[in-house]
Image: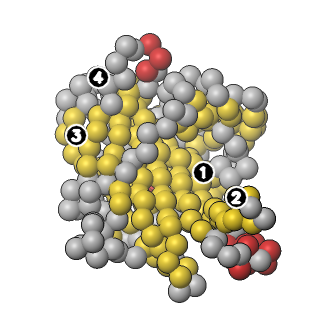
């Protein structure tokens, strides 16, 4: 198990933190965020695009998409389809409570000089070991971790899908993402390796920005409790992105580390 090493406070800060701004943004968007009844079915779109919730770049891969039910059961997608610029799949909701729908995981990126050329590779740490990549002169290794998620509730919201593992960047909401209303104070939280992460930048953008002259990005920074508190004035679907950049220890060696988290949610009017 690896963990982020906290940098000395006198050097800079515990971690170099940033919410990276990308021209292409990943998102998962369910047809409905909250439903009632005994059993329901939703359709979910996933893409990486220039405009939020408007597919125009590449489709999101579905091979590691996971559906976590309120009781912790994990399944794959139903009726998955991937085109050039969008993926679509179904999810059957047959348990009362909140589901997590998302993908992500860890990978490693290596860079080194060989025969006068810069070489780059992406893979697993074990794979790099077997291939001898870690033995290359001057190899630079970075651990990459990213999650893209959304949450859907059948009946009353529950919190089991927000249970933390104590490893990596995790979402710990105080306000349930399926209980967000305009004009009300909203509090979301994040932990890094089980501890609240302070000073992390968070961006929130209302969807369908293609049709606005101003993007209207809400820029926030996590406090000492790893939380952000904000109020939304307009109902609609929103996209949140945050991330960290620092170092981690693997096999007793310090390497670069980057983590990112993307969440889609909606705000309703009373």
- In percent of width and height, residue 82 lies at 75, 34
- Residue on which the image places disc 2: 118
Vertical relation: 249 (above or below) 120: below
Q: Is residue 1 above or below residue 264?
A: below
Quadrant for residue 59, please give it: top right
Label 1 – label 4 distance at C-alpha: 28 Å
Q: Return the residue nearer the eye: 41 or 54.
A: 54
* Earlier sequence position, callout 1 versus callout 4: 1
Q: Residue at x 43, y 73 (%)?
A: 4
Q: Earlier in the sequence, mark 2 or mark 4?
A: 2
Depth-wise, is mark 2 or mark 1 nearer the camera? Answer: 2
Q: Nearer the viewer, mark 3 or mark 2?
A: 2
The disc label shown at residue 60, or none: none
Identify the mark at residue 103; answer none if there is no mark. 1
Q: Is residue 97 visible?
A: no
Judged from the image, the secondary structure of the residue bearing numbered disc 1 is strand
Q: Distance of mark 2 from mark 1, alpha carbons?
A: 31 Å
């Amino acid at each position: 198990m690896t963990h982020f090493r906290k940098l000395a406070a006198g050097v800079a800060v515990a971690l170099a933190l940033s919410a990276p701004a990308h021209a292409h943004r990943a998102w998962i968007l369910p047809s409905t965020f909250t439903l009632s009844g005994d059993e329901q079915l939703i359709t979910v779109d996933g893409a990486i695009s220039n405009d939020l919730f408007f597919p125009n770049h590449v489709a999101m891969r579905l091979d590691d998409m996971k559906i976590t039910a309120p009781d912790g059961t994990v399944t794959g997608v139903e009726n998955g389809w991937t085109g050039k610029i969008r993926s679509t799949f179904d999810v059957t909701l047959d348990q009362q409570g909140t589901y997590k729908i998302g993908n992500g995981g860890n990978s490693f990126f290596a860079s080194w000089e060989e025969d006068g050329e810069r070489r780059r590779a992406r893979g697993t740490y074990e794979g790099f070991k077997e291939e001898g990549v870690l033995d290359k002169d001057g190899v630079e290794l970075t651990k990459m971790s990213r999650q893209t998620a959304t949450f859907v509730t059948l009946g009353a919201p529950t919190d089991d899908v927000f249970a933390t593992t104590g490893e990596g960047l995790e979402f710990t909401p105080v306000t349930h993402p399926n209980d967000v209303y305009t004009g009300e104070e909203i509090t979301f939280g994040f932990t890094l390796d089980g501890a609240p992460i302070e000073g992390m930048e968070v961006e929130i953008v209302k969807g369908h920005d293609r049709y606005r002259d101003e993007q209207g990005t809400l820029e926030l920074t996590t406090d000492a409790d790893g939380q952000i508190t904000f109020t939304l004035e307009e109902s609609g679907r929103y996209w949140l992105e945050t991330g960290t950049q620092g170092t981690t220890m693997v096999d007793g060696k310090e390497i670069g580390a980057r983590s990112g988290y993307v969440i889609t949610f909606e705000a309703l009017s009373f």
